[in-house]
Amino acid sequence: MDASLPAHMRPERSFQGFILALQRFWAEQGCVILQPYDMEMGAGTFHPATTLRALGPKPWNAAYVQPSRRPKDGRYGENPNRMQHYYQFQVIMKPSPPNLQELYLKSLAAIGIDSAVHDIRFVEDDWESPTLGAWGLGWECWCDGMEVSQFTYFQQVAGFECAPVAGELTYGLERLAMYVQGVDRVYDLNFNGRDGDAKVTYGDVFLQAEREYSRHNFEVADTAMLFEQFKMAEAACKKYLDAGWQKNSKDGKREAHLMALPAYDQCIKASHVFNLLDARGVISVTERQSYILRVRELAKACGEAWLHTEAGGAA
Amino acid sequence: MPDLLLELFSEEIPARMQAKAADDLRRMVTDKLVAEGLVYDGAKAFATPRRLALTVHGIPVRQPDLKTERRGPKIGAPDAAVQGFLKATGLQSLDEAKIQRDPKGDFYIALIEKPGRDAIDVLAEILPVIIRTFPWPKSMRWGARSGKPGSLNWVRPLHAITATFGLETEEPDVVKFSVDGIETGQTTYGHRFLAPAPISVRRFEDYEAKLLAAKVVLDPERRKDAILTDAKQLAFAQGFELVEDQNLLDEVAGLVEWPVVLMGSFDQEFLATPSEVIRATIRNNQKCFVVSDPKSNEGKLAAKFILVANIEATDGGATIIAGNERVIRARLSDAKFFYETDLKTKLEDRLPKFEQIVFHEKLGTQAARIKRIERLAAEIAPLVGADVAKATRAAHLAKADLLTEVVGEFPEVQGLMGKYYALAQGEDASVAAACEEHYKPQGPADRVPTDPVSVTAALADKIDTLVGFWAIDEKPTGSKDPYALRRAALGVIRLIAENALRLSLMKVAASALAGLSVKPADAQKLPSDLLAFCADRLKVQLREQGARHDLVDAVFALGGQDDLLMIVRRVEALGKFLDSDDGRNLLAGTKRASNILSIEEKKDKRTFDGAPDAALYSLDEEKALAKAIGEVKTEASAAVAKEDFAAAMSAMAKLRPPVDAFFDKVRVNDDDAKVRENRLKLLNEIRSATRAVADFSKIQD
């Protein structure tokens, strides 16, 4: 931890200081610090900076905060740590550096978790995203019995082998900050590190939103519209993918793709709309599987397109 | 003789894979050594979260020299054959070959001497192959090399390989090889946090000692012992008892290199939640042990838990305990909240939701399934001696707990929670018990329920499942049995046999079929198909118990057998009979009769059924046999009618002396065609007499 920081910026005092400490740490490891992607998504992994950049041979190191929307996890602000909107901090390094575990442990030290008094453990947890057609091996990282991060070596994304493999770290920011600040209720987190009247809590920022969105996600979200949106996003994704392929004039072979990113946006959209429909309870168990498969088909087609772009193609 | 030390140092290996990996490593290396002619004295393998280690001691320094002889062409053979021989054996010319004299012509013999190689060179060759082909259940690629084909697959990134070979008294040599850019050496590392510095090791003894000094207990058994001893001690010191849990112990020992056992507490108020839920929460989510309070009756849980940390913390573990308590408090308050929320809704009020949940695409919703089970339960109840109203009620409620929060969170307490919730809403005790027990028996070792209400619900549930999946042709094939139908069938058999129930499985299956909305094309055949499947399961079950499974075939071949209890009883009686002298000899006699008959039947292209003509008997033995058959048939049939299979078998035993005497004295193939025919008919009578109890031709010798 940086002792020169003013008190209100220290990671154990303020949520924003906590995020800044992580960003600074990973910036020092050579990561580009991105800002959140401007679309609703269930996890930081959906950000094209992870999903798409994990594919292809080119090196890529990035870190960013991503708001994660999990409509089903809403609890009307009444559960101390479950929310339909929370922050993930995401690090992706391709190829995975040999000392990624040590870097991770140093990052914990940077946010005030001292391995001399905390019990930090790497517990098997293989990650799989059926919607992204992705899987990897790794761990959930435990600190004193609490899962604080997910650590994954991506093996496959969008149905394609990762070559080389990227290492992905996902920190559950609120949970870690609660531990470091010693609060039991997420809404009690000190957001800005100030005291007295100047103090802003996580609840001040998000409690109302949790109540409103829980009502929306579970009770009111317009399912007819959402069903329509799913279809539209799916169709648009396919349309953009079709339009983006550049084919060889002689044999009609696909050579390059010019619109992988816009097409992938529609895949993200479809995935989130599906999550909302799921929260509304209007998708039956059997239908659920087929929706997941439909999103996966989009993700795979986008991955294939990405591998034919400048950033995703051969070095 | 020298020893090998091998260590594969990696990132954290999943706990559940460690024991098998250590075993595989030992087996693969030692098998290969033996195959290379290097017979060793002993080998032991170990695993921690970060390393697999192997020591093999007493390996010879060199392989023995191998001498082989190879036979070549005859003297004077064509040049092509000679050249081929020289090329294959590496001889310069035929002068180097020996000549072997042989009456059929003289041959060239090449003597090939393959000098043994140094063991260290052999090791350098075999170890990398073993590493590259190691059978991890799941393995991965990593790092820059993973971009290229042929990169190493390991369970998690592999960082260092220690491989030394040498005598106890000397400085050992490094077995030099490299895998995926990792060069072997003699440097390993201690505990990740407590002693991370590199350690130089020479051989196993100093390796193990240096690791221990660097806060790594290499042997998983030692870690388990330490955890168990400390955990018991810690619980005992506070007047509690550790609730032992072998699977959890195995797992926890695979999560730490330096186990430090600590005890934490949670609020008393959580103890109002069922102890199974508390235990599932603490065990599954936190991998901690629970402790019981011996002063309470039934050994109720105490508000304590035991955790196993991987470090000796500088604050004595206070932070670690506080952190774990926090998580456990949150988990338990979730569980308590789930439980209390569940209690607010009656089980039956949950049922409408099942109308939205598909059980199987072709078999309709869960709601439809529950209705079928209810209907079937009402039919089975009188056959089992259960109260129809209670059995139907149990079938009505038994699945409802699947929709509760607690079961959603911990699927392993399904059924059990149903019982708690049923009791809480004032259901009859048998109905509540059936909510739990209708899933039973879950396997060959599981308890079979005895309460008639539970038995009814369990049978109705399983038979509906079996008939349903049969109707949509989703029968188990080979190793695939996604709907656990084999287990369901065995459950039906055990429920019936162990409760001595009399019911016609065919009738119940036909009734279950009538309740289905799908109408399979071969509906007529389905109940008997299903019965045959149950017979197969019975055979497997008997075989696993070491009993004779062919007896099931012998009983089934009689046809019309669908009373499982009677089948089981008959098989038991038959087994006992065949263990006796009389039984064995009668079986031999019957088989002999059958063999003769089938030969003669083939010869004459006809069968020899029909009653023999008493007027044609010329020998006493014939008459005696005919008389005995008549008596035994009557007696055995009467006993079978009374379901007294032991008596039927005793009756059968009376056949033995006349059968033996007949074969002794009577020539079946008499010159007189009429006498021959009559004797063959008599043989056929033996066969048909034994069919009163079983088809002896299906019994293996």
Image: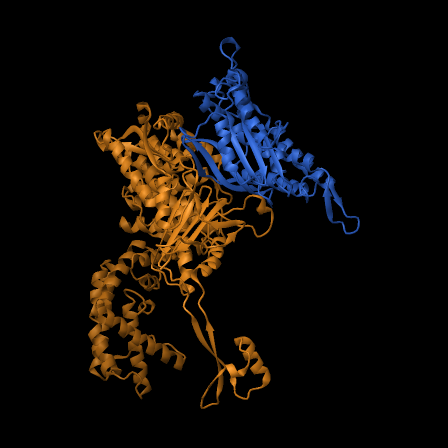
Can you name the residue that lies furthest to the bottom here?
A: B103
Of the chain colours in the picture, the one used for chain A is blue
Query: Is residue B186 visible in this depiction of the protein?
Result: yes
Image coordinates of residue B392 in percent, x first then y, are 35, 38
A304 versus B504 height, above or below:
above
Of the chain colours in the picture, the one used for chain B is orange
Quadrant for the C terminus of chain B, please. Answer: bottom left
Can you name the residue that lies furthest to the top here?
A: A197
A288 versus B481 height, above or below:
above
Image coordinates of residue B590 in percent, x first then y, are 28, 73
Q: Using the rendered view, name the quadrant where residue B433 is placed.
A: top left
The structure residue drawn at horizontal position 48% and vertical position 59%, both measured from the top left corner, is: B125
Image colouring: by chain
Query: Is residue A43 visible in this depiction of the protein?
Result: no
Can you name the residue that lies furthest to the front here?
A: B170
For the residue pair A136 and A85, the one nearer the viewer reads as: A136
Q: How many numbered circles are shown?
A: 0
For the residue pair A264 and A161, the one nearer the viewer reads as: A161
Quadrant for the N terminus of chain B, please. Answer: bottom left
B46 versus B589 height, above or below:
above
Image coordinates of residue A8 in percent, x first then y, are 52, 16
Image coordinates of residue B274 in percent, x first then y, are 32, 30
